Image (cartoon, rainbow, N blue to C red):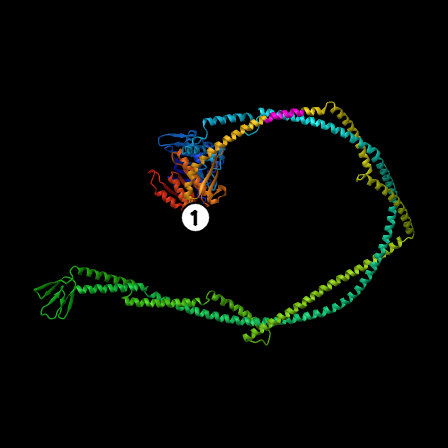
Amino acid sequence: MHLLSCRLQRVRQHLDLELSFGRQLTLVGGVNESGKSTLVEALHKTLFLRSTATGRGVEELRSRTHGGLPEVELCFAAQGERWTLRKRFAGAGGTCQLSNPKGQALSGPAAEDELARLLGLEGPIEGRRIAQLPERWAHLWVRQGDAGFNPLEGKPESYDYERLLQQLQSKTDLGTLQSPLDRQVVEQLQQRLGQVFTPTGRVKAGSALAQVLQREQECLEELNGAKQQLLELEQAMERLGAIAERLHCIDQDLRPALLRERELEQQQQLLQAELEPVLLQRQTLEQQQKQQQELKRTQQEQQQEQLRLQEQLKRALEQDALKTEQQQKQEQQIAAAQQQLQTLRTQQEGVRQRLDLLQLRRERQQLEAHQQEMNRLQSEASRLKQTLSQLPPIDADQVRGLRRAEQALAQAQARLEAMATSIEVIQSDQTITLADEAIQAGEKRQLNSITELQVGAGVRLRVSPGGGDALPQAQAQLERCRQDCERLTQQLGAVNSEAAEAIEQQRRSLERDLSDLRTAAKAIPWSGLSERLSALLPRQQDLEQAISLDRQEGLPSDPTALEELDTQLRQTIQQQSSALDQQLQQHQQQRQQEQAQSRQLEQCRNRLEQLAGSLAMVEQRLQQESTPASVEQLQHLEQDVKERRAVLAAMESERKTLQQQRQGSVGALQLLEQLNQEKELLLNERGQNEQRCASLGAQNPSAQLELAQARWENVQQERQTQEREANALQLLQEHFHQAQAELANRYSEPLCSALNPYLGALLPTGAEKALLAFNPKHGFQQLQLLQDSQAYDFARLSGGMREQFAGALRLAMAEVLMGAYDGALPLVFDDAFTNTDRQRLDPLQAMLQRGMEQGIQIILLSCHPEDYQNVLGWAQKSPLHSLEEANGVEVTLSR
């Protein structure tokens, strides 16, 4: 089975893509996002996905830029026939058509089933089973990003496991994995084990082993029950003794001590209650005394503060008067400095006005000079242009053309003269006429054509010049040259080339002079020249008027002296301005200080008024609260409190002793309640345990325990017998599978034999080989690369080596499977070797070439098709299988 051609319509970015596949190699190139992976996915879904499928698998094919539903046409060869498959993915309305040249045409489910048969499958993938789609021909369809995966790690169905085994069996003499006798042994073992165990390995319900295990569990429960009954009887008897001891301790030891502690606690509470009014009265008297002491301390502090503030106010008033006088002097100095600075600035303004006037006059003179020069240049340029316009427009090329025409005319004239015949009359007594024109003695004529010569009345001669046939050509050439010269002289307006050359030299000189004038004009700032002159006049008048109004005398008229005076004034003004700023800043700081001092004085006066009022109030309260009887009353209360506290301390000491004896932080009243509750519970529990002992002792618990022990041991022996028999069956099955696996491992040898030549092409050293294990249940496993006597697992190889090793394995699997598919299979690589270095490209192409030599059809998609030109060239040069198919095809996709 191999692919012939395909056509994609409205499939993602492809509006209409049609391409043919090479029999050996199809190289599809293109940049990223050019639709290479879309082509791979569309071909795969066309072969394996039902056309009526819905969901994500179909939505991924729809185009977002082109209207309509995705449609794919695929031509392929299978089972000796050429087939054409058309699928239109439209959900439930999708269509499928399959036909061949013999006239067989199928559609709908029949076409889907026939396609599956041709591909060796049970049926197409439904939309709800879209997750199974990547497993179809996963060993032949390498999607982008999956090249480094081991194709044997998936499910056996994903790499055509059954057909692979059949082809491997056909290549060896091992026969089948199981003989009929082996199959009977396996079935009997499975049947016997199936009676005992479930498929998951658990004991089967209802089996003899399960019944024995259930009886063992029941006997064990009975044994545990007997043990528990005997244990409960012993525990109940022990509990009765403990309850009796606890009741005796409560009645004889704990309750009397707690009652005494409770009595002491109540007496303490009574004495404490009597003490509280006395303490309150004492506290009131103590607070009164503290208030009097606080008032006296406050009175003393306020008196001291009053004296300090009065002294401070006196000094501040004296300083304020002194600073006011200093401030007045400073303000007079500042006013004088400002007046002097204003005078300097007025003088500087007059100087700058005179400097500006001088500058304006210089600028006006310069602009007027520029204007005069510009007018002169414009006049000269106009004269030159007028002179230039009166001359014919002749250039050097035209002069050279006229000179060549004159030279050609002279050459033609000389050539004609060389061919002409010369007649000279030396002396004659008769009339001589030449072409009906008389010739006198001494005249000489040249004949350029056949002419009649008559001498007298009776002699007529025909004179023919030399040159033969060349003479008319020379005459024609002379006429053409004469016409060319006349035409050129008329065009140029000159008599000859010397006159034309003189005119051309005169034009060139005028144009050079005009160019020099333009260069000189560019050096003059002519833009807005008149406007600037017009703008300068009002400014000059304003300055002259301002200077006439200024009455400053003694100012120099020399510009240099004015500039020096302006510099001196600017420096003086700057110095005096800085000094004045400093004086103003100091004056402002002094004013701020005076304002702050004024606020402090006002605060001081307010505080003195507050202190005067506060001292008067304190003196009044001291007079009201000062009584001598309160001191004696306080002493009497102190003695009473001392005596009551001594009694409370004695009671507290006795109560603490009782607390230390019982330990714990719980109160006596609470402990008494707890003891009463505990006693009540103990009495109830004693009754319950007495009743339980009577109930448990009705039968002999020891005899019941011995009987249950005997039953459990008998059932245990029976269970061990059943388990030994089941284990023996399992061991026999395990040994049988092990022997079968040892035989099955030899099935990996043919696959390794097919794989190693590809590794030899990829790794030319020849020391690398593939290792592979086989399990009848799980298929091929443990893919390794033997290199330098060291076996490396596939997962431990580098990314590039995994891609190349997996590619070699896929080629080998396709080579083995080709026998079941008419000797051909397609193998698709979508950017499968992105991690391969440049040095490995040639061996990689050699590996692909070996696959094509074995009959594998390789479809290679890459962003760098230039890397595979060698193997493409080999495929294109190899002999054709048929006239309709090319061996090597290159296709380039674009966005």
- In the visual, does 858 lie left or right of 565? left
When asked about the image quadrant of residue 622, the answer is bottom right
Give 839 or 828, whichever is nearer the viewer: 839
When asked about the image quadrant of residue 16, the answer is top left
Please state, as top left, top right, bottom left or bottom right, where the C terminus lies in the image. Answer: top left
- In the visual, does 141 lie left or right of 699? left
The extreme left residue here reads 458
**Amino acid carrying mark 1 in the image:** Arg
* Residue located 80% across and 65% down the image: 314
- Percent x, y of residue 779: 48, 34
Please state, as top left, top right, bottom left or bottom right, where the N terminus lies in the image. Answer: top left
Say above or below: 640 vs 884.
below
Mark 1 residue element: helix
- Principal SS element in the magenta part? helix
Give 7 or 828, whichever is nearer the viewer: 828
- How many C-alpha atoms fall within 10 Å of the one at disc 1: few (<14), some, or many (≥20)? few
Say above or below: 1 vs 354.
above
Whether residue 29 is visible, yes or no, is: no
- Percent x, y of residue 552: 60, 74
- Percent x, y of residue 777: 49, 32
Say above or below: 579 vs 679.
below
| Disc 1 target residue | 838
Whether residue 606 is visible, yes or no, is: yes
- Percent x, y of residue 2: 39, 36
Q: Does the segment drawn in magenta span residue 867?
A: no
* Residue located 85% across and 53% down the image: 291
Say above or below: 747 vs 409.
above
Q: Does the segment drawn in magenta span residue 710?
A: yes
Give 25 or 129, whichever is nearer the viewer: 25
Per the rendered image, the range of residues in magenta is 708-720
